[in-house]
Image (cartoon, rainbow, N blue to C red):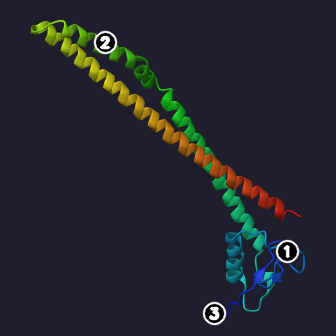
Amino acid sequence: MGGIKLSKFCPKCGEVISDEAEKCPKCGFELVNYSSQEKEAVVYASQKFTNSTNDVSTTPSISNVTSENKKKNKIIGIVMCVVGLLFMLSAFKAITNSYYKYCLDNYDYYVSEYNSARREASNYNWGIIKDGYNSIASGYADMANDAKMTIWTTRIKASVFAGAGIVLIVIGAKKIKKTKELEKVDSP
């Protein structure tokens, strides 16, 4: 590997330890608490920063690498929560929109007027009056269909945004919680 000797370091004290070790021989830090991703970070950092003489003084502390990952995970978690809240706000804004409320309030009126115009048209067997009522009924049918389409597209959009917001908030909160738990484990 081009002069690089593979070894592993304790994330807490920086002591060189064997690959099979479950505890650091110097400080007793348990290595089994680390997730596979964090173990890979330890091995990667060991490969990257260990020179062939295995001089620990020139090797950065692995705890700095994992604390940087923890910081990134915490920031990602916070950003996910904020974006989730924005999605939830968008969902709320969609269902409180004035045009949505207008359509919701007037849908029943349009259907009622459509039915009324159809009844009136049925009272006439022919002529301009029957055609006039049918034309009025057709206009109310169009308005009812437009209102119904607006109502349902708004509801679907709000549901999708709310669902995505909830998912982002839950995942973000889990990331933040996991980072805090790892910080408690690492603190002396």
Look at mark 3 in the image and give the residue it sits on. 2
Residue 130 pos. (x, y %): 15, 10
Asked where in the image residue 86 lies, by quadrant, the reply is top right
Left or right placement of residue 13 versus residue 99 in this view: right
Q: Residue furthest left?
A: 127
Judging depth in this view, the residue of 144 and 67 nearest the camera is 144
Judge the density around disc 1: few (<14), some (14-19), many (≥20) Cα neighbours within 10 Å.
some
Judging depth in this view, the residue of 177 and 83 nearest the camera is 177
Mark 2 belongs to which amino acid? Answer: Glu
User: Residues under labels 1 and 2: Cα distance?
Assistant: 80 Å
Left or right placement of residue 118 versus residue 64 in this view: left
Mark 3 belongs to which amino acid? Answer: Gly
Q: Which mark is residue 113?
A: 2
Look at mark 1 in the image and give the residue it sits on. 13
Residue drawn at (67%, 93%), measured in percent from left and top?
Answer: 3
Residue drawn at (73%, 68%), measured in percent from left and top?
Answer: 66
Left or right placement of residue 123 versus residue 161 in this view: left
Q: Which mark is residue 101?
A: none
Left or right placement of residue 148 versus residue 131 in this view: right
